[in-house]
Amino acid sequence: MAQTAETRVLTAHVPLQLAEKVDQWAARLERSKGWIVKQALTAWIDQEQERSRLTHEALADVDAGQVIDQQAVQAWADSLGTNAVLPVPAARR
């Protein structure tokens, strides 16, 4: 027999327009509103976890001195779309 995951009910007040969009997507996908909210919440949590991971990775690079000079990045960006595109700047150590 399949084991059911434990669940907990969360309550949130959302703007009426957002609630109506959830209703519309639930009807369009023939899914429950709870399923829609669970999918959205899962995607948001995944996005925030990835953002946190990337932030910590970037801070570790800074701590290790692996940074790219802002002027080098600006010069590279300014060269894009010209006939003299500069190479992508590399981290200095």
Image (cartoon, helix red, strand yellow):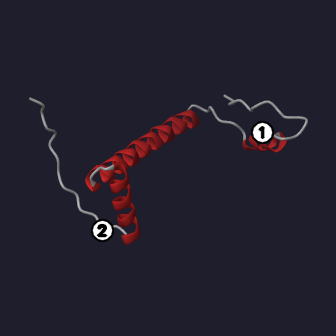
Question: Horizontal and vertical percent for residue 19?
Answer: 35, 65
At horizontal 37% and vertical 46% (from top left) the residue drawn is 45
Residue 13: mark: 2
- Image quadrant where residue 27 sits: bottom left
Classed neighbour count for the residue bearing mark 2: other residues with Cα under 10 Å, few (<14), some (14–19), many (≥20) = few
User: Is 23 displayed left or right of 87 in the figure?
Assistant: left
At horizontal 83% and vertical 33% (from top left) the residue drawn is 86
At horizontal 65% and vertical 35% (from top left) the residue drawn is 67
Residue occupying the far right of the picture: 83
User: Is 21 displayed left or right of 59 in the figure?
Assistant: left
Depth check, front residue: 24 or 46: 24
Vertical placement of 4 versus 1: above or below?
Answer: below
Question: Horizontal and vertical percent for residue 49?
Answer: 41, 42
User: Is 12 displayed left or right of 89 in the figure?
Assistant: left
Check disc 1 and report its element: helix, strand or loop. helix
Q: How many marks?
A: 2
Q: Which mark is first along the chain, 1 or 2?
A: 2
Residue 91: mark: none
Residue type of the residue flagged with mark 1: Ala
Depth check, front residue: 31 or 19: 31
Indicate the quadrant containing the C terminus: top left, top right, bottom left or bottom right: top right
Question: Horizontal and vertical percent for residue 25?
Answer: 38, 55
- Image quadrant where residue 46 sits: top left
Instruction: Report the Cα–Cα distance between label 2 and label 1.
Output: 47 Å
Indicate the quadrant containing the N terminus: top left, top right, bottom left or bottom right: top left
Classed neighbour count for the residue bearing mark 1: other residues with Cα under 10 Å, few (<14), some (14–19), many (≥20) = some
Question: Horizontal and vertical percent for residue 10?
Answer: 22, 57
Residue occupying the far bottom of the picture: 16
Depth check, front residue: 21 or 59: 21
Residue type of the residue flagged with mark 2: His
Q: What residue is disc 1 on? A: 72
